[in-house]
Amino acid sequence: MQLGVEMEFWVVDELGDLCDGHDLTEAHELAIPEFVESLVEVTTPPRGSPAGIAESLADVLDTLLVRARETDRRLVPLGTPLTTTDSPVVSARGDVLERIYGEGLDVAKNCAGTHVHFEQGVVARQLNLLTALDPALALVSSSPFYGGERLATSSRAYAYRYKAGHDVGKFRDLWAYTDDPEQWDQRLQHLYEELRSMALNRGVTVEEYVDLFDPEDVVVTPVRLRRETPTVEWRSPDTTLPSQVVTLLEDLEPLVAKTADLPVEVGDPGVTNDAIGVPAYAELQQLSSAAIERGLDSPFVWKYLEAYGIDTTRYHPLADQFYAGDTIGEERARRVRLEAARLLERDVDALYTTVTERR
């Protein structure tokens, strides 16, 4: 199975303040600008294993970190910037989204995630299993703070799902299981037309809308079906240290690969010789809420993940390493960003060393 990863990182200056980082992407072809100036995205080409993903991430991030150091900047692997960023939108698509959603887009401007692409196989099974694995976001949660307040273990996921407003809800929520990928496409087409109406009502021209949007990317749901790639995209987790993403892939890739041979059925969670069991959707929603709010501190969550053979003791989420407190001020946030940047640099060095030794 071919895999691909996208990871978003904040860019800060030597004091820990968010700053423009889009020129950093000139250092490597697999680094691309995000829609706000203080975010950059790192991508990988399709690779056939988690080890291959590790190699690609080490290569692009090592290059990007060198360029950042040369210009007194750092990359930060946190799901949110901790406090609110007023980083401006710097893309045509972002500008149109801001016109459509107004302040509703502020949540997206303050979130950074990891997206994993799995090569399409038996698509309905993959969609349903990855939906059921939404609580695995607890394994790599990286920021409990959003807008200076402690919201949840994954404040990014909490903000996306509960704070973005009614107009955004249908475009961002976890969808129920499906037996028919065509129904998934039909729902996307309906939302594409609905967003088009919203855009036209806010002064966006038909030409602008058609040029910047297509049905498969009008939603920011935790699971997306990508026809052009073609992949099933899992968008649940925060951005974090790349080694943690590789560990996550080592656990998830074998599970998703089993969908080639085993049906995915509602029942007892876990894998048997006959099927992959997933919880009823209502129970899954409760699990996801617990994963977002409490992470691995919830026995409900870690026992669920271990039912799929995931050893949760292998994970040490960055969100659990923050000091206790209900709020975080700007001065403390700057220090935490710089500490997270140092953790990233050490992590990439270790990953790069491991990859080099394998070669």
Image (cartoon, rainbow, N blue to C red):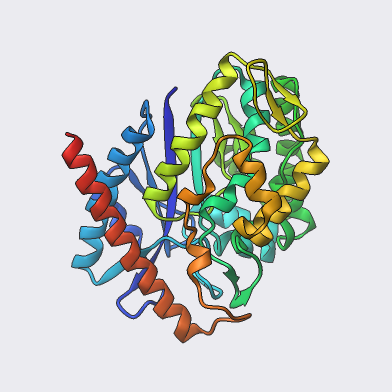
In the rendered image, the residue lying farthest to the right is: 282
Residue nearest the viewer, comparing 88 with 111: 111
Decide: is 104 above or below 212. Answer: below
Left or right: residue 115 compared with residue 13? right
Relative image position of residue 116 (x, y in whole percent):
49, 38
Can you say which quadrant of the picture contains the C terminus?
top left
Relative image position of residue 62 (x, y in whole percent):
24, 52
Relative image position of residue 82 (x, y in whole percent):
53, 72
Residue nearest the viewer, comparing 191 with 260: 260
Residue nearest the viewer, comparing 82 with 150: 150
Can you say which quadrant of the picture contains the N terminus?
top left
Decide: is 246 above or below 9. Answer: above
Left or right: residue 67 compared with residue 183? left
Left or right: residue 284 compared with residue 319? right
Which image quadrant is residue 210 in? top right
What residue is rendered at 67% in x and 43% in y? 304
**Is residue 19 in view from this perspective?**
no
Residue nearest the viewer, comparing 153 with 20: 153
Decide: is 258 above or below 99. Answer: above
Left or right: residue 328 compared with residue 278? left
Label tally: 0
Relative image position of residue 212 (x, y in whole percent):
56, 42
Which image quadrant is residue 2 in? top left
**Is residue 110 in view from this perspective?**
yes
